[in-house]
Image (cartoon, grey):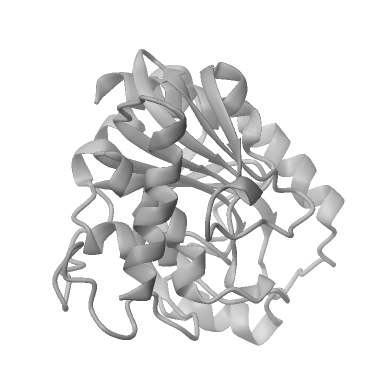
């Protein structure tokens, strides 16, 4: 299959440049790149140099793979991710997750910026994902199954590893980080939601909404990779008091949440 061949070509290219045995993969979302400053970097590769790799087109996303040590563990960090709304297929969006699996990662950590649907949330709070609702228009597993990676009908009864959720909540409590546990609704974007859509999301059980994460998690679980995911709440989605969303404010909120998220992820990775 051509797609599988491309995955191996990308993986082989990276392995030809370095000898590196990664334990964990990390996907850094909008405005949440400060974790990179905590990594003892050994190698970096620009996305554009990797065969078949997409290239991020979003203003707030860098575009490189970082290899190094975080909390004493070998990690690969994606500094910049891809979205369906950029024009990529879901297979392209999730291409790096498959490549990281081929490189040897054993767990995946994902961060994102999200709107707070739960009215108890405040701007710059953190939300650990305990489940999600997929409202996107395309599934990354559509088409012929990649038997090399996983089964045709992967189980999603625990998309986010419960053990890591419990550990992260304990870390947040110990560090005094304002943090919740909740359900993430994944939408296609790029427009934000209407007031009626926010009411709908709250009705169906969502606590936060965003335009990423779910495709990567589906593919990770297809490959039986345990996942931990966390959102920075960058705006409040109260349909009765809705303010116009501004990117500058969203990025400022993500920056405010960054310190707590960095501390939490550092400590959580150290426990794995």
Q: Nearer the viewer, residue 90 or 172?
A: 90
Q: Say which quarter of the image contains residue 162.
A: top left
The quarter in which the C terminus is drawn is top left
Residue drawn at 34 percent across, 83 percent down: 142
As drawn, 204 above or below 251: below
The picture places residue 175, in percent across and down from the top left corner, at 45, 18
Residue 43: percent from the left, percent from the top?
53, 24
Q: Residue 128 at x, y = what percent?
A: 41, 46
Given residues 8 and 243, the one toward you in this image is: 8
The residue under the point 23% across, 50% down is: 225
Residue 202 in the image, given as x and y percentages of width and height:
50, 74
Residue at the extreme front of the image, as rendered: 16
Look at the image and tell me in which quarter the N terminus lies. Answer: bottom left
Horizontal arrangement in the rendering, residue 86 relative to residue 262 (left or right): right
Name the residue at 76% across, 69% down: 241
In this picture, is 267 found above or below 122?
Answer: above
Relative to residue 49, is residue 84 depicted above or below?
Answer: below
Residue located at (55% from left, 49% from top): 50
């Amino acid at each position: 299959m051509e797609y599988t061949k491309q995955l191996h070509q990308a993986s082989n290219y990276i392995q030809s440049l370095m000898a590196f045995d990664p334990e964990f993969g990390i996907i850094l979302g909008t405005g949440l790149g400060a974790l990179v400053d905590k990594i003892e970097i050994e190698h970096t590769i620009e996305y554009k140099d990797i065969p078949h790799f997409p290239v991020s087109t979003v203003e707030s996303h860098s575009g490189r793979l970082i290899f190094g040590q975080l909390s004493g563990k070998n990690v690969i960090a994606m500094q910049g991710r891809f979205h369906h709304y950029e024009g990529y297929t879901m297979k392209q969006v999730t291409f790096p997750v498959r490549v990281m699996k081929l490189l040897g990662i054993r767990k995946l950590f994902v961060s994102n910026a999200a709107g707070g649907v739960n009215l108890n949330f405040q701007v710059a709070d953190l939300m650990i994902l305990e489940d999600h609702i997929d409202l996107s228009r395309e599934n990354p597993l559509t088409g012929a199954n990649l038997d090399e990676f996983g089964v045709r009908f992967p189980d999603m009864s625990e998309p986010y590893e419960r053990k890591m959720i419990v550990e992260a909540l304990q870390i947040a409590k110990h560090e005094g980080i304002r943090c919740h546990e909740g359900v993430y609704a994944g939408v296609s974007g790029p427009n934000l939601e209407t007031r009626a859509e926010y009411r709908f999301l709250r009705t169906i059980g969502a606590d936060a909404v965003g335009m990423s994460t779910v495709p990567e998690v589906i593919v990770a679980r297809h490959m039986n990779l345990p996942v931990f995911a966390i959102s920075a709440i960058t705006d409040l989605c109260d349909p009765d008091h809705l303010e116009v969303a501004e990117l500058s404010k969203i990025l400022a909120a993500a920056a405010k949440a960054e310190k707590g998220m960095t501390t939490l992820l550092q400590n959580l990775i150290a426990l794995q």
